[in-house]
Each structure stands twice: as structure tokens, then as C-alpha cells.
Image (spheres, rainbow, N blue to C red):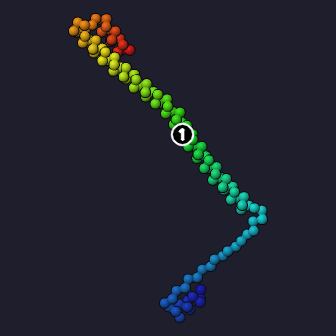
Amino acid sequence: MWHDSVRRQVFPDTDVATGGIGVSWKIDLSGRLRAGAKAAEADALAVEQGAHGVRLLVLTDVATNYFPLAGALRQLETVRAISAAQDETLRLVTARHRAGLATPFGVERARGDTAA
């Protein structure tokens, strides 16, 4: 602008900032903006409820699979304890047989229980 160059020649050590703000208003007679805002709120609520539903599904799957897993792990512990007891029984019966205190039938029965 020409007046800016003149101002700089007259006042070289000053700087002026210029700017403009335009404001306009529209009357929302049809309620379009209000309806848009309500639609945005409904969308946000739907997303929130969807996330809540997903959390519930995940928790349901975890609970559904956790209890059978816990039961299977307990069963495995029991089978391992029984197996260890049968191994110990076979060891003791074999030792007793060597000492002449158990029959060969007892040793074979202990071996069969251990193998089963």
C-alpha cells in the first residue's frame, strides 16, 4: 500500500500491524445447526456405547475361558500328584520285593498302576 511506504519514510523506527476481523451471523430458522449438534451428540454417545459393548464382550470371553482353564490346570495338578504317588509306590514295592517283603505280583500291579 502506498501510504505504508510513506509512513516508513516519515517514521522509519515504527511498525504498525493491521488486520481485519469479519463477523457474520446467520439466523438458523430451520434448526439445521441445532439438529446437526444433536446428531453429533448422538454419534458420540453411540461410539461410547459401542466401546462399552466391546469391553463387555471381552470380559465375557475372558470369564468364559478362564474358568475352564482354571479347572483344567487343577485337574493337571491332581494327575501329576497321582502319577508322583504311583511312582513312589512302585519304588517302595520294588524295594520291599528286593528285601523279600513283597511278592512279584505286588511289583507288577504297582508297575501297571504307574504305566496307566
Residue 74 at what x, y percent from top left? 43, 27
Q: Quadrant of the N terminus?
A: bottom right
Q: Give the answer, above or below, for where 39 lies relative to 11.
A: above
Left or right: 79 with respect to 18?
left
SS under mark 1: helix
Q: How many marks?
A: 1
Left or right: 102 with respect to 82?
left
Dividing the picture into quadrants, the one containing residue 110 is top left
Q: Give the answer, above or below, for where 102 lies relative to 91.
A: above
**Nearer-the-camera pick, 46 or 17:** 46
Residue 25 at what x, y percent from top left? 71, 71
Residue 24 at what x, y percent from top left? 70, 73
Instruction: Kindly identify the amino acid type of the residue bearing the numbered disc 1.
Output: Leu
**Extreme bottom residue here?**
10
At x 66%, y 56%, the residue is 40
Dividing the picture into quadrants, the one containing residue 33 is bottom right
**Extreme front residue here?**
101
At x 54%, y 36%, the residue is 61
**Nearer-the-camera pick, 19 or 36:** 36
Neighbourhood count class around disc 1 (C-alpha, 10 Å): few under 14, some 14–19, many 20 upward: few
**Nearer-the-camera pick, 110 or 41:** 110
Q: Give the answer, above or below, for where 61 lies relative to 36.
A: above
**Extreme left residue here?**
99
Dividing the picture into quadrants, the one containing residue 56 is top right
Q: Give the answer, above or below, for where 17 lies relative to 100.
A: below
User: What residue does disc 1 label?
Assistant: 59
**Extreme right residue here?**
29
Residue 107 at what x, y percent from top left? 30, 9
At x 55%, y 89%, the residue is 5
Q: Quadrant of the C terminus?
A: top left
